Image: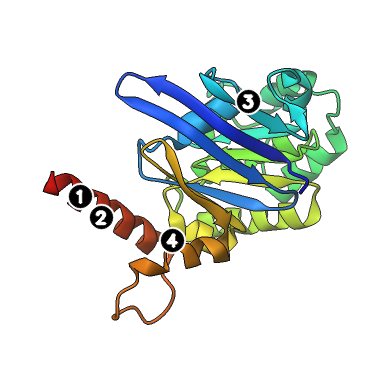
Amino acid sequence: MKTVLDVRDIGKRYPGFTLEHVSFSLAPHRIMGLIGKNGAGKSTTFKAILNMVKPDSGSVTLFQKDFSRHEKECKERIGVVFGGVDFYPLKKLSAITAVTRTFYADWDQERYQKYIRRFALDERKKYKELSSGMKVKYLLALALSHHAELLILDEPTSGLDPVSREELLQIFRQIVKSETCSILFSTHVTSDLDKCADDITYIQNGRVLQSADKETFLQSFAHLKTPQDAGPLTLEEIMLRTERSEWDDDAAL
């Protein structure tokens, strides 16, 4: 099967934490949610994929190319959004854009202006003057303006109110439907993924517990249901019951 992203046996060791044998694949035109409690390894996985930290083992393939050997070429085709990170807070959006566009051979100014209008962004504003939701929209506009084929989003809805979160999720769904694009995003707001994800990867203590399309994923945790559960478990219920089981195991030691 053709993939946009193929992560195989990624490992990274730190004092007190180890990312071990992390593997999953993302197909074209799909949204994959990466879930796990704080400290499970989601951000480390993203950084290893992007070579922001050098993995101790494993491989990352982007667009059928070995990322370690084709990093510059691959990065031309991806967009990255880290929620809660303020780049150049005192710069106006127009100044940030002027610098950003120089890094991409496929920069499309007409496309950029289309998203600036669509997201109702004012380029005269400084980055720090934007709300959290508008910051994410601006970073999405930058990513989509160089025809990114993969968006990697780390906690993009973090700190947003329910209305702003729902608006962004709708944008994600529209992007995947109308653009040549796939999305990988991590979040601790699992209800977001209930609404928009096609695939789920669950990381626990540095290991992939399960990675599958959402229906298969939910079915694989059916054993956690109790007689009191009227319908299928939500992602939040799956996480809570899985993590609670680990707490109980630790308490028994």
Given contact means CB atoms under 8 Å apart, are the residues at marks 1 and 2 in contact?
yes
Given contact means CB atoms under 8 Å apart, are the residues at marks 4 and 3 in contact?
no
**What numbered label is drawn on residue 235?**
4
Of marks 3 and 1, the one in the foreground: 1
- Dot 2 or dot 4: first in sequence order is 4
Label 2: few (<14), some (14–19) or many (≥20) C-alpha neighbours in 10 Å: few
Q: Secondary structure at mark 2?
A: helix
Q: Which residue is mark 1?
A: 249
**What numbered label is drawn on residue 245?**
2
Residue type highlighted by circle 1? Asp
Of marks 4 and 1, the one in the foreground: 1
Label 3: few (<14), some (14–19) or many (≥20) C-alpha neighbours in 10 Å: some
Of marks 2 and 4, the one in the foreground: 2
- Dot 4 or dot 1: first in sequence order is 4
Label 4: few (<14), some (14–19) or many (≥20) C-alpha neighbours in 10 Å: many
- Where 147 sits versus 93, above or below? below
Which one is in front, 60 or 21?
Answer: 21
Which one is in front, 105 or 38?
Answer: 38
C-alpha gap between disc 1 and disc 2:
6 Å
Of marks 4 and 3, the one in the foreground: 4
- Is any atom of residue 121 visible in this view? yes
- Residue 56, how many percent across, how many down? 51, 18
C-alpha gap between disc 3 and disc 1:
52 Å
Residue type highlighted by circle 2? Ser
Residue type highlighted by circle 4? Leu
